Structures are given as C-alpha cells and as structure tokens.
Amino acid sequence: MFQRKEKYHVYITHNTYRGMLLEAGRHPGNESIIQMPGIRIGNDFFFDMVADSGINATYTPAMCEKDHVYADHLATRLSEYYDFSNGKLTVSQVHRHPNGCLRFSPGDYPANIKLAQQFGGVVNGLIFIDPEFRIRFWYIDENGDETEAEYEINDQAVRAAMPRIDLRKLKQTVERNEAARTAAGRMERRTVDGSDVREAICSKLSGLFKESTGEEKYMDNRKDRGLQTTDAASEEDEILMDDAFMDFEKMQEALRPYKVLIPEEYRKQRYEGKLMGYYLPETKIYNIVPEELYSVRTDARPLGVAVRSEHIERNAGSISDQFGLSLVWNGDDAMISMKDNMEVEILTEYYACQQEVFSRNQGIVEKDKMSAKQAIISGTGSGGFKVGLELIRAGIGSLIVADNDILAYHNVCRHECGIHDVGRYKVDCFKERAADINPNCKVYTFRDLIQHVDPAELEKIIWKDSIILCCADNRHCGYVCNELADKYHIPMIDAGCGPRASTGEIFYYRPDSGMACYTCAYGEDKGVDYSNQAVRRRFYATETELEKLHFQPGMYLDIQLTAIFEAKLAIDLLMEKEEGYEPKLLPYINQCTVLLNYPVHQDVNPYMQLFGAVEERRPLTWKSGPAQKNESCSYCGPKGLRRFYT
C-alpha cells in the first residue's frame, strides 16, 4: 500500500512532529538531536514518538553531543510499546543544524554510516528554522550514499504499520511474571540480587524474537507480511510476550541477520561433507573455510554439514540433528538452515580465495603470474618470516621454508609470532600463518637448516621459476644459498641487519650472468662461527653491547624495513621478464645495497661511514654499488666449485 519502487518514504505522527518542535524549542539558537525508534517495511519508514538528546547532552550553536546512554535507554523503552511483527526495527536520528547548513555536516557522516550499517540502511533527517520550521529526510545506505526521502504526517498509516502492544496481554504478562517470581522466592528461600532479577526478566519484544539453543540467545523470526492492524494478540504472541522487556543493544543484536561465508569451490563441486571454520558471535558470521586451510590450522571447528538435495534422505539424520548449520545443495543454490531455528534470517555469501584475497593486487603484481612463482627461504626469524608473509600476500604460488629454530620468549618482541607460539618450530608457525592468508599457496617446510635438507627431496619440489632468499643470521648461509642458486639456475638474495638493526644489508645474484658471486663480495666462507661477529649479523647488538644497551623501542620496525626491501626485490627478480611488469627497485640499485634505518656511532656500526659525515647521515636512505668480481675467486673462478653447475 505504501511502498514506492526505488523511492523512500517516511511516515510520522503528530506525536513525532510535536517531539521535534519541543526539542528545537528547548534550545533556541543551538544544535539539537532526537532519536526515533520505528519500523521499516520495504522502502517505507514509520515513526510515532521521539527520544530527546538526554539529561547530560551538550548543546552549542555549532555542536550537539547527545547523552548516548540516556537516549538509547529511552528509545528502548519507547520501542517496547509497539508490535514490530510487520517489519524490522529501525532507528532514525534527526538533527537541528545552524541556519545555512543545508546538508549533513562532515562530522555527521561517520555516525550516519555506522547507524546505517547497524540497521541495513536508515533515514536520518535535518530540522531547519529559516524562519519557518521544516524537516528534510534522506535515506542513507551502508556505504554512506544519500537519497532524499519524502515524508508526511499520517497517524493512520503509522498506527497500521506499528500497532501498540495489546494492553490486556501486557497486564497478564506482568502479573504472571510477578507471581512466578514470588513463588520462586518462597521455594528457594534466598535473596535474589539485582543482577539475577535482570537476568530472570530479560526478554523478547512481542512478536519479535524467538528463543534458541546454541550460540545465540535471540533470533529474528519475522517475515514481511504487509501492513495490517492486530487488535488482539495471537496464541504465539502470548508466548512471546513473556518477559517483554530487553535493552537496546540486545534488540539491535537480535535484528542483525546471520551471514554464512562459503568457498566458491564448494558451490562449483556441490561439496558434501562436514563444514569446518569459525563462528564469530559478535558479528553473527559463520566463516566456512576450505580444506587447504583447516588441514593446516588447528583451531577450525565443525560448524555443520553439507549434502546434495538428491542425497537428503540418506543423510537426513546428520542434517537435522548433528550440527548447527545444515547446507543442502539444490542445483547451484545453497539452502541453509540452523538447528532449532529454521526461520532465522540467514544471508549467504560466496568467496574465492584467489579472487577475493588478491583482488587489490590486480595491476600491481598480477596474481595469476605470481601464482606460477616460488621462493625458497632459509631462516624464519624476524626478517625471513616477514619476507615470506609479504610474498604470500603478493600471491606467490609456492614457498619452501627451512629453519631448525624454535620460537622462544625473547623472540616475541621482534617476531610476527606471539606468546601462544612459544615452543613451536618457526617453520610450523609460518605454514599456519601462510594458510591463513592464502590456503592455495603450496608451502613446504623443513625443520632443519637449508644445507641439511635432503637434495633429493628438494629436487622433487623446486619449481623452474624460483628464487632463493637467505634470511639467516650468519654469513655461512649466504655461501650455501649462492651454491644452490647456481645448481638450480635461479636468482638469489641475501639480506640481514647490522648491530641494533641500524642498517640493513641486501645482496642479490643472478646465475649465468657474469655477476660477482657471494664469495667475491664477502671473501672466503668461514663457516658458522658465532663467536666471530664478522660472520654473524645480529638483529640487535653484539653480546658485549647487550651489557650496556638500554631498551630500544621500535627495533622490530627497523628489521621490517630490510625485510620489505628484500621482498620487493624478490618480486622484481621473479617478475622482471613478465610482459608489462614494471620493476620497483631493480632500476635504482646495484648488486650490493646498504640501508640506513637510523644513524648510530660508526664504532657500533662501521657501515655509517658510507653515509658521509655525522651531520649528513639521514634515516631511511640507502647506498648501492656494484660488487667487484674476483677473477681468482675460489668459488666462481676458473677452478672454483661453480664450474660443476654451468
């Protein structure tokens, strides 16, 4: 009767109009705001009474700050007067702005959007007195877009849309609750404190909510049934009238529909079996995840089962009784129901990991091309772990990760992992984090140093388009990775941080290109000798320095600067031959680069002398230069080991 296609209409009563006049009249020359609970039926909104700004509100010519606790409480009490079975509860806010302000102010927009997201779109209004009193309304969607809405004062339309709760039934409910409480008090012979009373009488609005078992207390079981006046409560209404009071937050929570997120591949294959994932009660979202993720992570939980409609009889028992969610494939469509709440409103949304997770990578690094690339990472400490996650986010197709280290408490302040990971192998933590970002990425892990990984096993899983990244805290690993780069004819990057992470050091190498090797750049391999600082890079300081160091906040950030630089360079080296790709770092650096994260004394870090005099040194700069090839190098020279890989 009232709905207009693609238009929004607001119906208010004389009570509503009177409330607006009174609020504006109480604060002449100042801003003010009222809050109105009402009902939405399609594109039509109905309101009868208003809640003012509150006893502790602030009124000035340029701003009104309402008393949120008071206004929400009063709006809740007003809404309890009405039967909302015809539609959905909504809330509107109407502002009085200074003269000359014809639209919502910039400060209004965040509040408008938040309210629209809570209720799936709202109508908010503005009051003008210039000099005539007038009102304008706009429909605001969940993105903040505004469409002007018509309004009219129509008491009859509002009464039909949101009739008041039957007085006789309400009286019976109050008397019945009181009698039950009195009887319970006599039987238990105890004093019930205020919180128990509130818990005992916390309830549902008439015709609005349905009690359920499981995670949620309240479910919205309403249907749009058109406008009609109910003069007497039905038998169902009488049941739902019990304990007919609840607070405003619970009303909003109960009105929010459930949402189920389903992998797109499940729809394509009409998946049958258990549904694993996560339930988020604060947002009422069921996040169903694919097997590639829950087979790696250990915290995914059973949410329900899925079955095709043609097999429904065979699996009827498990569908109806075993789990909270029941998903039945009828062709390509999923029919979802919830145990004990068959009429609850459930929204369905499909997602595809490759498309959704990497949708914003298009045009930067094409995800389809990156999915054919692989990286081998030696070391998953502060830097290597970060580099790997950044490559996962870039859409890389596979990672091979090797490290024998176990996460300890002293790692936590400068690592992606947390306290709950202490005692676990870092590579296991990495595989879990990687799956959480892109479960389609193939991650192979070895709880060992890269030089101890079985070459036969590595041979089976290494891809043609790969790169090897040395992220260990010792130079010996750099020599090992250089040898692997030549063996498999793939590029290599070695990166690490200097004392206190004041500098970052990046070296890259392309086999078969005539470039200087790691031995040319850094001299002969001295093995893993942690007593020699020349062959060990510490992310913080030497052991001697640790005794005199004060706490250095933000050190993890300095480590990440080096890790991000290495990740960007790795993407450049993987993608440089792809048509249309524009390198981000390669055109601007040479084979050896030193980053200055922040200046320290050159006695602490000798690399400081590369950046000039003390007064010339600036953080977040770098120096880059070529590595000099040594014709008599013991590795890449005529008699060196590399000749076996050419």
Image: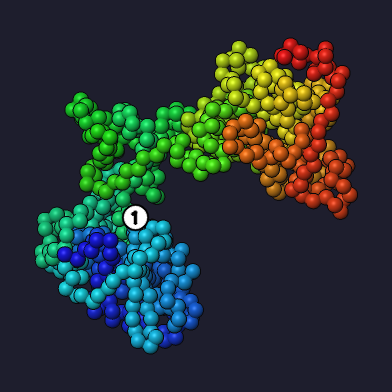
Quadrant housing residue 75: bottom left
* Left or right: 141 in relation to 567: left
**Residue 397 versus residue 637 in the image, above or below:** below
Q: Which residue is mark 1?
A: 253
- 173 w.r.t. 294: above or below: below
* The quarter of the displayed image where residue 426 is located: top right
The residue depicted at 74 percent of the width and 24 percent of the height is 513
Which residue sits furthest front? 579
- Front-lying residue, 153 or 577: 577
**Residue sitting nearer the eye, 458 or 33:** 458
- In the rendered structure, the answer to whether residue 322 lies left or right of residue 424 reads left
The answer to whether residue 625 of the structure is visible from this angle is yes
x, y percent for residue 379 = 66, 28
- The residue drawn where x is 71% and y is 49% is 553
Q: Nearer the viewer, residue 263 or 411?
A: 263
Residue 299 point in image, percent of width and height: 45, 34
Coordinates of residue 505 in the picture (x, y in percent) = 76, 36
